[in-house]
Image (cartoon, coloured by chain):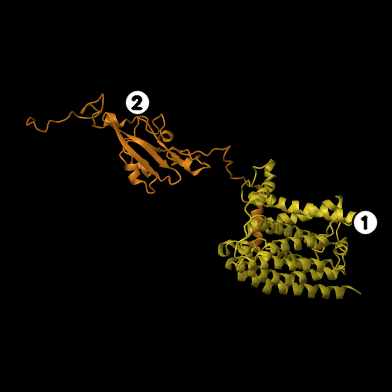
Amino acid sequence: MTIGFGIFQIIVSLFVLLSTAAFLTWVERRLLAVWQDRYGPNRVGPFGLLQAVADGVKMLFKQDWTPPFADRPVFVLAPAIGMVTVLLGFAVIPVTSGWSLAGGLNVGVLFFLAMTSLGVYSVVLAGWASNNKFALLGGMRAAAQMVSYEVFMGLSLLGTVMLAHSFSLSDIVLAQTHLWFIVPQFLGFVTFLLAGIAETHRLPFDLPEGENELGAGFHTEYSGMKFGMFFIAEYAGIVLIAAMVTTLFLGGWLGPVLPPLVWFVLKTGVLICFFILLRAALPRPRYDQLMAFGWKVLLPVCLLNVAVTGAVMLLVSP
Amino acid sequence: MLSSVRTLWLTFLHMFHRRETVQYPEQKPYLSPRYRGRIILSRDPDGAERCVSCNLCAAVCPVDCISLQKTEDQGRWYPEYFRINFSRCIFCGLCEEACPTYAIQLTPDFEMSEYERPNLVYEKEDLLISGTGKYPDYNFYRIAGMAVPGKDKGTAEREDPPVDIHSLLP
């Protein structure tokens, strides 16, 4: 692979990702509307398709205000960190066998976990630099939630890694040629999905932002495009988690008849729609319920999954 | 856990339900005649102003958004100016209830947004319509016992002639 093609790939990936994330704001609102018997945004352009553009223009021209009491450098840096970590996470995802930035990286899974962990800094620093009690509380809750769900997010992937005998995401996809890992690793799939939703602090696990008790949470003081970057990072995070679930448990680009790229996009898209359905259907749990669910239910389940997978592999293998 | 999955499924089924949205600017909602929207001043069937500037509407208004000044012309009272500040008005309808002459009425029109706040102050020219509003037949000066040009005391509809209180005759 030449350097030129690599740069081309990076630019295309970046463009596709950012436009997908912006477009998702429209998709989400339309889908939520469908599930609540409404129409959603349908005024700007055909079917409201230009809503994302309108929102972007509004964001750009809004007053971008930094509060005088904020820690300015950190305040500005925080949303950028969130954005960068999410975008870096995409580097290791193999879209198809021929199209990936670093899909063959031999520690791909670890790189992904590292990047999602770094995402914690974004929210914590945002909450802390805002110098506002509600933002700080939101940031702290985000930190506690993300750290605890990070623990078994890694564990839930262990079974997959054991079955594929590799940390490389391309190898993991290729190991699913005959059977998607969602079947032998169903517990891992469910726990990873839940951990992933909590990682991107999506509903129903959006407790860092619980507006009824925290104001807007860690981004209370943010305005304009800095707020927009949190927003876009969240949507890019959804795409990232959906792509990871596709890669790890749903056979990535593998599938009959249709070209590999279509299969990947299709699976990721369905998962994203499922995330939005979760938002439309489920109420937000209380914060202590969230933590208890993570530590007391999901962590033991993950450990059990790893133990059982190991035992079965020992029994089956010669 | 099961209930969560059931919720997901039931929410998903809403995809096939009818949508309830009213596409507002194209699809106007029906508002009954007694809807409390934009306030108007009506005229009586003869085309004269109904308002007699009794000040009851301004007195009853809970937010003090009505301001008017009385003036007189040949025995008839009418407002010299009549001003409603719609940026204050809460559309409670108390002014309409207080009005003894059906002059002030609330109509089903609610599309009265403005870009400039001062534009929400309606003067008498903006409020006064040429019709009678909701009460087509009511004419205060024909019923009231006041003497106005063309109508002496005792000649109003359903009015007895004035009694001479100094006379002893039955």
Q: Residue at x 86, y 58 (%)?
A: A100
Mark nearer the viewer, 2 or 1: 1
Q: Which mark is residue B43?
A: none
Up the image or down, B43 lies above or below A62; here it is above
Which of B114/A156 is in front? B114
Task: Rate crowding at label 2 as few (under 14), some (14 to 19) or many (20 or more) other CA atoms within 10 Å.
Answer: few
Q: Colour of chain A?
A: yellow
Work out whether disc 2 and disc 1 sit on a shared chain: no
Q: Which mark is residue A2?
A: 1
Asked whether the viewer can see residue B8, the reply is no
Marked residue chain, label 2? B
Give percent across and percent down for residue A281. 63, 57
**Quadrant location, the C terminus of chain A:** bottom right
Which of B16/B42 is in front? B42
Q: Residue at x 68, y 50 (%)?
A: A56
Q: Which residue is mark 2?
A: B46
- Secondary element type, mark 2: loop
Task: Rate crowding at label 1 as few (under 14), some (14 to 19) or many (20 or more) other CA atoms within 10 Å.
Answer: few
Which of B5/A42 is in front? A42
Give percent across and percent down for residue B168. 6, 31
- Secondary element type, mark 1: loop
Q: In the figure, is residue B108 to the left or right of A12? A: left
**Quadrant location, the N terminus of chain A:** bottom right
Distance in Å between CA atoms under marks 2 and 1: 91 Å
Q: In the figure, is residue A270 to the left or right of A141? A: right
Give percent across and percent down for residue A57. 67, 48
Marked residue chain, label 1? A
Amino acid carrying mark 1 in the image: Thr
Q: In the figure, is residue B134 to the left or right of A121? A: left
Name the image quarter holding residue B79.
Answer: top left
Amino acid carrying mark 2 in the image: Asp
Q: Colour of chain B?
A: orange
